[in-house]
Amino acid sequence: MGAFKAAAIQMRSGTSPERNAVDLERLVREAAGQGATYIQSPEMTGALIRDSQARAASFTSEDKDIIVSTSRKLAKELGVFLHIGSTAILRADGKLANRALLFGPDGATLAIYDKIHMFDVDLDNGESWRESAAYEPGTEAVVTEIDGARLGFAICYDLRFPQLFRAEALAGADLLSVPAAFTRQTGEAHWHVLLRARAIENGAYVVAAAQGGLHEDGRETYGHSLIVDPWGRIIAEAAHDQPAVIIAEIDPAQSVAARKKIPNLKNTRDFAVNATSVEAQSLRGAAS
């Protein structure tokens, strides 16, 4: 297993997929020019649109999507693995998927992953999101091979569900992906610590390309794209919310080494949960 360069590209996607495709191409070319052979873009690379009617009018099927066609062309031209962190895709059943796509150096689609966990939350200061009102959740975790590493897929809010990453690590993933559009509020609180935790728990690299800044639709995202090594060290960061490219070396041997030092994947055990109530404990105490 040889080492290779991975890139996370930080974007500020607007409401126009065509303009975002131009920005994507510029940043992908910059990353490839710096030697990256695996390049990841953030969640909702194609567009960030809060208005439901405008969103419905903007998105199309995978075979007609400009982000898909641009990415396929770039992957083949540049000879890279291009991972679109996600874009909105209209499914055959008329529902939207928040979908990640991985294109190989020949332009072929190597894997797709539909975001499993929907961001349905009510935050402080009145900020509220209902992703499930617009998107149909996925039902399948995905692990695939790139450049001698095994890549596990996730998208944004999936980060808060460690069981997904553990399942992918147990399936052989030594490189975990978390493309995201984290809100500024939640990013400031949890972004760094959660990404480092997922790397440490699984002895795996984590690449997390992020959206950043104030977007056309009014939302504000945190930025701070990160690459974390299997020991939990941040080895590359865009320490701001501006469009950027960050690059770091991925060496699958380092994942092997981390898992030998802390063999928690090997040592995992099944167990039952005995959730006893305080009332039941009191009754038992009285009976004795």
Image: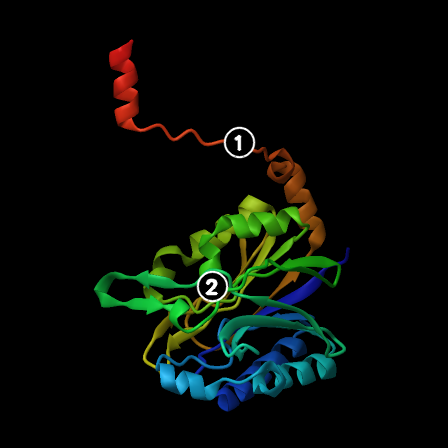
Residue at the bottom extreme of this rendering: 18
The residue nearer to you, when weighing 49 against 35, is 49
Q: What element carries label 2?
A: helix
| Three-letter code, disc 1 | Phe
Name the spot of residue 268 as percent of width and height, x first.
Answer: 59, 35
Name the spot of residue 215 as percent of width and height, x first.
Answer: 37, 80
Crowd rating for badge 1 (residues with CA inside 10 Å; few <14, some 14–19, many 20+): few
Name the spot of residue 183 as percent of width and height, x first.
Answer: 36, 67
* Residue topped by disc 2: 156
Q: Can residue 173 be seen in this view?
A: yes
| Three-letter code, disc 2 | Cys
Residue at the left extreme of this rendering: 125
The residue nearer to you, when weighing 130 against 246, is 130
Point out the image quarter for the C terminus. top left
The residue nearer to you, when weighing 81 against 153, is 153
Residue at the top extreme of this rendering: 288
Residue at the front extreme of this rendering: 93
Q: Can residue 231 be seen in this view?
A: no
Name the spot of residue 214 as percent of width and height, x first.
Answer: 35, 78
* Residue topped by disc 1: 271
In this rendering, which labeled residue sits more in front, label 2 or label 1?
A: 1
The numbered mark, 2 or 1, whose residue comes first in the sequence reads 2
Q: Please name the residue shown 68% across and 50% down the image.
A: 172
